[in-house]
Image: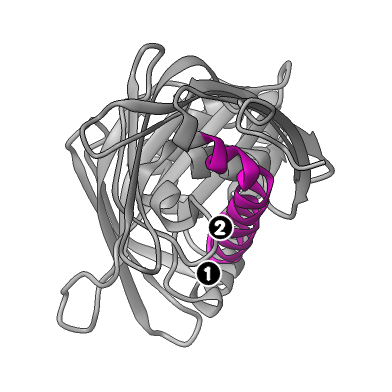
Amino acid sequence: MARTATDAAERELVLTRIIDAPRELVFRMWIDPVHLAKWWGPRDFTNPVCEIDLRPGGVLRIVMRAPDGTDYPMAGTFREIVAPERLIFTNCALDRDGNVLLDGLTTVIFAEHSGKTRLTVQTRATALVHSAARYLEGMQAGWEQTLDGLEQHAQDTAARELIVTRIIDAPRDIVFSAWADPKHAARWWGPQGFTTISCDMDVRPGGTYRACMRSPEGTQHCRRGRYREVVKPERLVFTFAWEDANGNPGHETLVRVTFADLGGKTELTLHQAIFDTVGACDAHRAGWTSTLERFAEYLGTRAANRRSNTDGEPR
């Protein structure tokens, strides 16, 4: 029996995917308009308009453009935002005059899955006019293709995004101070075998830093940036760029370092996004991993000196 418009007036779907990318990254794919515009919608659609006011009651507005050039505007309102666990928002298909054709409600659950993300999308849509019933007929295919785009974009981004985590056997306030104090940073900064030549840091929002180090072969490397956030002892957010031989900064990325209290120890997580190539990301990952090894060793030495009362702890 053929389905009628009345039969198709409402539809609900539950879709689940395992995405090979960290949960925090997948969550960000949904709330950052730069990312969302790159994957939202059925295959071969683009999103010339993608605007997000990320707060409960904030508005979501997207204009999807089909391969034939037809625009399909949609709008919604965020009802619940629990990072990085859950999003609930309305999503309504509109006509050219802004009238609602299809009324929808979507819940997205992000669950940790051994370094990957178990994504569950529960979405319900109701056709408010007869002509919108055809949207419901293609609803599952549209959502499946949309999640295909999300999965591909998340995996590509994860390969070019750097996240390094290390457990350091020192209290959080001491770890933060050792990172934010130039007198201490000069003693551990850089990969194994490197030495610091200069280290100037103005650790405040809007403050700048510049540090130079020398490799074992004698080559000088200088980095510079500006602090965006300083929340002691929880996190530091700053820009990062290497200088060329003439002192000009190269490609700039954003670095976020968080310090989580583990009952006397500290979980340090460094996030740097997003590199142009996987090779550039891998090169920075090797450098940061070696640098954090030196950082942990330095704090271990300071702790030993404190216990023997021969030196002071970073303050």
Check disc 2 and report the residue beneath it. Answer: 162
The answer to whether residue 107 is visible is: no
Check disc 1: other Cα within 10 Å, few if <14, some if 14-19, many if 20+.
Answer: many
Query: Which quadrant, please, contains the C terminus?
Result: top left
The disc, 2 or 1, on the residue closer to the chain's N-terminal end is 2
> Alpha carbon of mark 2 to alpha carbon of mark 1: how far?
6 Å
Of 168 and 61, the residue lying toward us:
61
Find the magenta span and give its range: 133-162
Contact between marks 2 and 1 (CB within 8 A): the answer is yes
Query: Mark 1 belongs to which amino acid?
Result: Cys
Q: Residue at x 16, y 75 (%)?
A: 247
In x, y percent, where is residue 239?
30, 51
Q: Which mark is residue 302?
A: none
Query: Mark 2 belongs to which amino acid?
Result: Leu
Compared to 308, does 226 lie above or below?
A: below
In x, y percent, where is residue 132?
48, 35
Residue 164 lies in the magenta stretch: no
Query: Which quadrant, please, contains the N terminus?
Result: top right
Residue 158 lies in the magenta stretch: yes
Check disc 1 and report the residue beneath it. Answer: 281
In x, y percent, where is residue 271?
52, 48
